Every structure is written in C-alpha cells, then in structure tokens.
C-alpha cells in the first residue's frame, strides 16, 4: 500500500513538473549596433566561469607571483627552512598585492564597474574599459626584452603601439 501511494505521488509530481512552462535557457537576442543580449542562464554561466578563472588572473596579472618568490628567497636567505610557513607567505603576498594593485582596482571600479552597474554601458564596453588600467599596469611591470621574446616565440612581432599587444602575449611576458 505504501509503495502504491509513493507511485501515485511520483506520477502526479512528474505530471506537474513536465506541464510547467520552461524558461528559455539559451537565447541570444541581437541588439542595435551588432550587440547581443544573453539570457540570465548564459550570464550566470559566464560569471561562474569568470569567477573560476579569477585565481589564475590573480596570479598572472598582478605582482603576486613576484612577491611570493621574493619572500621565499628571503626566507631561504635567513636560513629558516619553513618559518614562516607557506601559508603565512601567501597571506602576506596577497595583502601586499592588494596594496600594490589598489590604484589599478580603484580605476577599474570607477571607469568600468560603476558605469556598468548604473546601466551607462554594456558588459562588453565595461570589460574594454577595465582592460585599459590593467594593461597599463602589466606593461609597466614587463621588460621590453621579455615582451619581444614572447612576441618572437608566438610569431606576433611588430606592434606599433602598446595597446596593440594582446593579453595572451602580455600575460606570459
């Protein structure tokens, strides 16, 4: 009897679930000027993907790696094998990175995030506006020889302006 009741409840719930109208999960709406508007599900998927890439961006696009290397070399120079621990070195490097990147993050916030949140610009325009201060920081921290080396390796030589250097070349340099 108990199994029959569960079967009937299961059948009723399956009918309710299948009868419910669905949401358009993957819809791209073309807009003016070639822009595209994505549904909320695509936006959430893109945001979660971007958040999963945030640690890699933190390591590649900031001074974090350099700080960790300098602190670990300093630890070895002092002759302390594991004191302070790696967790403490990483924590110090993280706070120092936020301190160093503070002006860049403020500029990104003012020029890209605030206008985007106020619906003054699209997401693509906000990303393009945020790219400018990050690119300037990265170019200031990159030696010309290193940039030329990676440009030669990738076969993308001959940039007239610093703005022409793609991020895929700037990050490893």
Image (cartoon, rainbow, N blue to C red):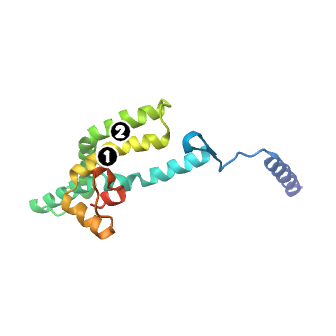
Q: Quadrant of residue 32?
A: top right
Camera sees residue 150: yes
Q: Is residue 120 left or right of residue 27?
A: left
Camera sees residue 83: no
Residue lying at the far left of the rendered structure: 78
Mark 2 residue crowding within 10 angstroms, few (<14) / some (14–19) / many (20+): many
The residue wearing badge 1 is 134
Q: Is residue 98 left or right of residue 48?
A: left
Q: Residue 36, relative to residue 69: is it above or below?
A: above
Q: x%, y% of residue 142?
A: 22, 55
Q: Is residue 168 left or right of residue 30?
A: left
**Measuring 37% from the left and 35% from the top, which residue is drawn there?**
111
Q: Secondary structure at mark 1?
A: helix
Q: x%, y% of residue 24?
A: 69, 47
Using the image as rendered, state which of residue 171 and residue 156 is in the foreground. Answer: 156
The quadrant of the image that shows the N terminus is bottom right
Using the image as rendered, state which of residue 84 and residue 143 is in the foreground. Answer: 143
**Measuring 85% from the left and 49% from the top, which residue is drawn there?**
12
- Residue 2 circle label: none
Q: Are marks 1 and 2 in contact (CB under 8 Å)?
A: yes
The residue wearing badge 2 is 108
Q: Secondary structure at mark 2?
A: helix
Inter-mark Cα distance, 1 to 2: 8 Å
Q: x%, y% of residue 156?
A: 33, 64
The quadrant of the image that shows the C terminus is bottom left
Q: x%, y% of residue 164?
A: 33, 53
Mark 1 residue crowding within 10 angstroms, few (<14) / some (14–19) / many (20+): some
**Measuring 13% from the left and 58% from the top, which residue is drawn there?**
74
Q: Residue 150, relative to residue 12: is it above or below?
A: below
């Amino acid at each position: 009897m108990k199994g029959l009741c569960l079967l009937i409840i299961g059948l009723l719930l399956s009918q309710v679930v299948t009868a419910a109208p669905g949401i358009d999960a993957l819809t791209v709406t073309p807009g003016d000027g070639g822009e595209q508007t994505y549904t909320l599900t695509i936006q959430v998927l893109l945001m979660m993907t971007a958040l999963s890439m945030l640690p890699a961006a933190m390591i590649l696009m900031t001074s974090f790696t350099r700080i960790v290397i300098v602190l670990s070399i300093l630890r070895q120079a002092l002759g302390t094998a594991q004191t302070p621990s790696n967790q403490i070195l990483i924590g110090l490097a993280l706070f120092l990175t936020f301190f160093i990147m503070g002006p860049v993050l403020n500029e990104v916030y003012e020029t890209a995030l605030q206008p985007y949140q106020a619906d003054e610009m699209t997401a693509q325009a906000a990303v393009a506006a945020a790219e400018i201060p990050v690119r300037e920081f990265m170019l200031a921290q990159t030696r010309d020889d290193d940039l030329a080396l990676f440009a030669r390796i990738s076969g993308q030589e001959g940039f007239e302006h610093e703005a022409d250097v793609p991020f895929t070349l700037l990050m490893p340099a």
